[in-house]
Amino acid sequence: MADAAPSSILIVGSGVFGLSTAYSLARNPAYKNTKITLVDRLSFPAGDSSSIDTSRIIRPDYADAPYSALAYVAQDLWRTTEWGADGRYTEAGLALTAGPNGCAYVDESHTNVVALEPTATSERCTLPESRGHGRAKIEELRSAEDVRRCAGTGGINGVQGYVNWTSGWADAEACMRFLYSKVQATQRVRFVRGTVARLDIDFNGPQKRVRGAHLADGRALSADLTIVAAGAWSSALLDLRGLVKATGQTLAYVPLAPSEQAALGSSPTVLNLSTGMFCIPPSKNLLKLARHGHGYTNPITIPHPEEPLSAAENITVSLPRTHLTTPPLPAHLPREATLALQQLAHDLYPPGAAPHDKSFSPLPIAARPFSAARLCYYADTPSGDFLISYHPDYADRSLFVATGGSGHGFKFLPVIGDKIVDCIGGACPQAFRDRWAWPKQRVLPEDGWAGDGSRGGPKGMVLDDEYAKSGAKL
């Protein structure tokens, strides 16, 4: 480290970035004398956290070569170490598909994964439980029938693309619980339950300085270095307009019979990047339908979080609304989301072709009501890059920000904490120095953000507006 380690560090948020950072700090000899505190509004695991879910895609399939290379390293850890042990990681394959007009992201991802493993287009998949067993590890899908054969569900989701049989998925909640147990075992991190109302900002002097955080119940937590790793909630603590916004992504679950689970459990994830619709193989007799899209914004007017409260102007930012917030999210999704997920089920699991255990339900999979539905909140950035940097407006390196996961942070769980700690110490990986740096300017309006090119579906949707179209009262 270029500078002496801070005597105390406060981490706000127990999601992927926050918890992995705590673990890396606790194991790093440079911070052996540092007091580490992690605060979250809910006891772990937070029931509405994006990382507390049944499954997340694990892939090196990126259109951006540096992310592809880093994910390749992470995936090896998922595959070969305790990170993916005890059923936490399953290598069932990933089909990246597109509509008739194709998708540049799919083409560039194919190029990058083949460059990482050039023999994958000729070497055969040897996993006996994989649908890709005996086939090339990476193979192109040139038609709807190729996609149908690959999916193994009787249906399609996209009409072209490729499948990487060496990609997979992880049980997200089980992985986060595993990491939490590893952090606890270090006996180095103090966990505090409390909602951070505002950062403790010292406005005296030529430049502001963060001294910790004020909690909603009146308590205060002090630290030499405060790390905001609050994901989609980060905009409640910092003015991130034009830099980071919360977007709600739709997902729902369909109950399956054990026989249907057995028939579909080895299917690959099929992600159509033209529409954003995808389905991860079912687990524990639940099938997850979801959309990796532009999402819903939820505009909320709040006092400017970085101005003295007595004189703060009001600003409008997008913040999560979940079943645990006030006001809570309705139990059902907006109508357009419900219809989109039902269409995905019908396309990928068509009645008459997909497995159907009539003794479990007279309804085929595509016609069954959802057993649960929710919004998964992304912390989106204009380019889809993470934001991992000291905040330039604060003195003494007192405020560090690790957010902007943009819907693709989870797969880096085995490595991202170490990378964040490298950045704290001034040693950001060369390939990401520009990508993760504090942006030179805000990108407004936010509805024009291009992202990383992996999003599909409708743009510009506002949560209240979509519920209003459904006739729901919020």
Image: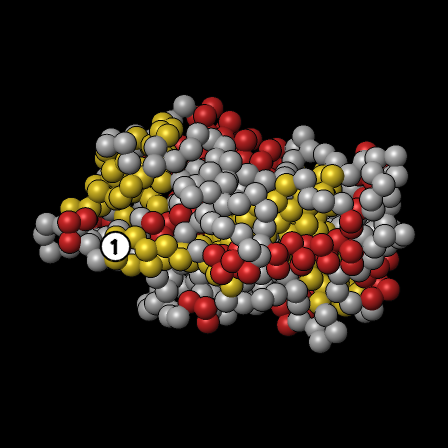
Is residue 20 among the parts visible in the rendering? no
Q: Secondary structure at mark 1?
A: loop
Q: Amino acid at mark 1?
A: His
- In the rendered view, would you say 102 is above or below 250? below
Task: Please state the horizontal and vertical placement of residue 327, each as a whole percent of the image.
Answer: 42, 43
Residue projecting furthest to the left: 205
Residue at image point 58% right, 64% down: 455
Task: Please state the horizontal and vertical placement of residue 464, each as a whole percent of the image.
Answer: 47, 57
Closest to the observer: 343 or 400? 343
Residue at image point 42% right, 67% down: 446
Closest to the observer: 116 or 14? 14
Q: Could you tell whether 435 is left or right of 139 in the image?
A: left
- In the rendered view, would you say 427 is above or below 185? below
Looking at the rendered image, the quarter that the N terminus falls into is: top left
Question: Crowding near pointer 1: few (<14 within 10 Å), some, many (20+)?
Answer: many
Q: Quadrant of residue 437?
A: bottom left
Task: Please state the horizontal and vertical placement of residue 320, each as a whole percent of the image.
Answer: 44, 49
- Which residue is under mark 1? 304
Residue at image point 79% right, 46% down: 365
Task: Please state the horizontal and vertical placement of residue 428, each as a whole percent of the image.
Answer: 40, 54
Residue at image point 75% right, 53% down: 345
Q: Could you tell whether 268 is left or right of 187 in the image?
A: right
Residue projecting furthest to the bottom: 101
Callout count: 1
Is residue 356 among the parts visible in the rendering? yes
- In the rendered view, would you say 20 is above or below 338? above
Colour option used: secondary structure
Closest to the observer: 169 or 375? 375
Closest to the observer: 387 or 203? 203
Q: Quadrant of residue 357?
A: top right
